[in-house]
Image (tube, rainbow, N blue to C red):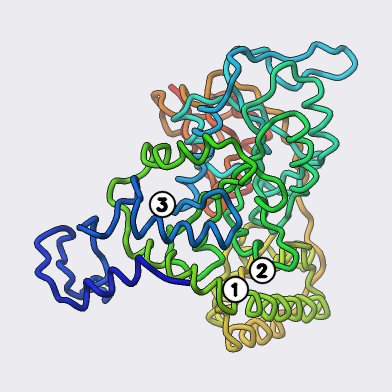
Amino acid sequence: MNTPIYDFVNEYREKKISRLHMPGHKGKAFLGCEPYDITEIAGADVLSNACGIIEESEKNASELFGTAHTFFSTEGSSLAIKTMLSLVMSDRDSSGYSCSNDKDIPCTFSLRRRPFILAARNVHKSFIYGCALLDLDVEWLYPDDFKSLCNCKVSAASLDQLLSKAVVMPVAVYLTSPDYLGFVQDIEEIAKVCVKYGVPLLVDNAHGAYTKFLNPSRHPIDLGAAMCCDSAHKTLPVLTGGAYLHISKKAPASYTELARNAMAVFASTSPSYLILQSLDLCNRYLMDLYREKLNTCIEKVDAIKGFLHDRGFVIEPSEPLKLVIDTLKSGYRGEELNELLRKYQIESEFADPEYLVMMFTPEITERDYERIRTALSNVPTRSCLSKPIFHPEKAISRCSIREAVFGRRTTIPTAEAIGHISASPSVSCPPAIPIVISGEIITKEAVRLFEYYGIDSVEVLK
């Protein structure tokens, strides 16, 4: 597979042209990457109106992922998420929003005349900011049992029941899968429900770009999603910020027609050509021997999981490239175990009071696997630690997300926040999942969660 973006930049670099254009380093090596860092010069195409080498590379990616079109983002999945929301807002064909008053089943959707999206509660904060910018309301899907901020399991049956009672449909259903702890929703069955009711399914697949190359594919587009985003940089050899917006061949044609302009609305006019080259080179990487490398990597990760299980660690079920340790059941707080691993030169992806998460790719070396074995061989499992019981209530909103995000706010100690209205979402990052959504009342139970996750101050509306 050709690499038109990389080839163009490399040829430009080799010509040693006088760079009387941006950026200011003029190709001189300070970090070392500067000779490859260019701007939108003649022949380099324009990401916001791609019709040359960028479009050619995107078509290569579209072929790899089997999409109507795959668009490049140099601003992560955050840009793709906002674009997906914009596209379903533009495509809606109804202006009245209400719901059934069936007495046997409580009405889930508010009686409203504004468009709304139906979303699982464990959204990334970029989704909240997208809703604020678009003035889009959200009706939340909650898990039956609260396990973690990261989790929000949605069943196809429960979604079917909810949509069957709606007089007017949401503009879309929105899920995060895989989530930060590696849980994967039943996208295939949920997509069937969405098709039944004519509602597009959007998936934040930021952690699952590689799932296209499993056998069989478990990528959301192949399982029936209308659109999804992949953070290529999370699981593929792509520079930070490189991501994809995928649009299904079965999605409305307007999504593909409007996507480029919609991305331009939210994006910088100065996209990184380093990231674009990285996405471009990744096409060839995926086309070559990636499937074999991925399979080998999964086998090694499975072996590590088995090794740790035999050592007494409690390993959570997860998608193939994540290792998730339930640290409380293993006798540690997640942060404590993370510090122990750092002594062995291991930096994990994420740790909170209950879990520790490691992310693997084929680029992990044998030295890295051996460090994990050595480190956790020297860390004995201990008696299970108790876990606080939380009963998060269903949220009560006092204003729209947009009003809260752009409203006047003040920062107060978490302990004093009960009864206040949340402004900007307060999150622990990673995983950047809000405990209270902008516009919602902060409750006593929410304050307990804030304090549990180490958030000692919050922004509230004045």
Question: Residue tagged by mark 1?
Answer: 361
Q: Position of residue 353 (x, y in %)?
A: 66, 57
| Quarter in which the C terminus is drawn | top left
Q: Residue furthest right?
A: 104
Q: Which residue is mark 3?
A: 75
Secondary structure of the residue carrying numbered label 1: loop
Q: Quadrant of the rendered structure where residue 66 is?
A: bottom right
* Type of amino acid at the residue the image marks with label 3: Glu
In the rendered image, is residue 454 in sight? no
Residue 109 horizontal/vertical position (percent)? 71, 20
Residue shown at the point (52%, 26%) measured from the top left: 401
Residue closest to the eye, 121 or 37: 37
SS of the residue under disc 3: loop
Q: Is residue 126 above or below residue 215?
A: above
Where is 103 relative to 125, above or below? Answer: above
Pointer 2 residue: 321
On the picture, is 272 further left or further right than 430? left
Q: CA distance from mark 2 to mark 1?
A: 7 Å
Kind of residue indicated by mark 2: Leu
Residue at 54 percent of width and 68 percent of height: 236
Mark 2 / mark 1, whichever is N-terminal: 2
